[in-house]
Image (cartoon, rainbow, N blue to C red):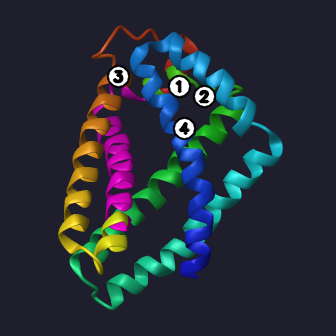
Amino acid sequence: MERLHKVSAGFVFAFLCLHFANHFVGLLGVEAHAQFMDAARLVYRHPIVEMAVMLAFFVQILTGIPLIIEIWTQKKDFIHQLQALSGLIMVVFICVHVGWIVVARMVFSLDTNFAFAASAFVVPFTYAAYGFYGAGVFALFTHMGCIVYDIFKKTNKPVGWLLLLATLGVGGYATYLLLMMYAGHLYPVIIPQEYLHLQRL
């Protein structure tokens, strides 16, 4: 189970590197975000690649839940508990986030672009969006930090702790920047009416 979880994690990690690169390019502006997305979609919107990514996410969830239960039932150490908690948050986030994207694309024929993400921060859902997206992004960095710690704990535990704390620090700042960007605090964000209508459903 754990081996399969690690194998599927490789595919998920490759996609997330591209996906988060797209988010961070957005710090340069909406137009830069759109240009990068158009190029990136040539890769991850290919039917075979998209199917592989979705399968990898499904395997991650399917194998991750038993691992979370194992960690909690066996009452493992604090780092494992943190890894399990961040994993559970990511499971919830992925299910809701991907589900909402599928509904937007398949039911409402909307492009899940910058405006789609930014529309979540419109009143009355502003604070819920901060909590939901903030928890999802920070949980990812927390999970990765725990993995890095686990790699070094046997050979050099102080380095493991240092890398864990560094990952949490970077994750916290990255989460802050992305929330501020999509909420329109870094530069003006104009959201088309069709996306505002989606959020009122």
Provide the secondary structure element on which disc 3 rests: helix
Residue ID for mark 2: 112
Q: Do the residues labelled 1 and 2 touch (CB within 8 Å)?
A: yes
Q: Which of the two discs, 2 and 4, sits closer to the camera? A: 4
Rate crowding at label 3 as few (under 14), some (14 to 19) or many (20 or more) other CA atoms within 10 Å: many
Quadrant including the N terminus: bottom right
* Cα separation between marks 1 and 2: 5 Å
Residue 135 within the segment the image draws in magenta: yes
User: In front: 179, or 201?
Assistant: 179
* Cα separation between marks 4 and 3: 16 Å
Q: In this view, does 132 lie to the left or right of 16?
A: left
* Cα separation between marks 1 and 3: 13 Å
Quarter-wise, where is residue 198 in the image?
top right
Which kind of residue does numbered mark 4 sit on? Answer: His
User: In front: 195, or 51?
Assistant: 51
Residue ID for mark 1: 116
Provide the secondary structure element on which disc 2 rests: loop
User: Image point 44% across, 12% down: which residue?
Assistant: 29
Q: Which of the two discs, 4 and 3, sits closer to the camera? A: 4
Q: N-terminal of the two: label 2 or label 4? A: 4
Residue 51 point in image, percent of width and height: 76, 51
* Cα separation between marks 2 and 4: 13 Å
Residue ID for mark 4: 19
Does the image show residue 110? no
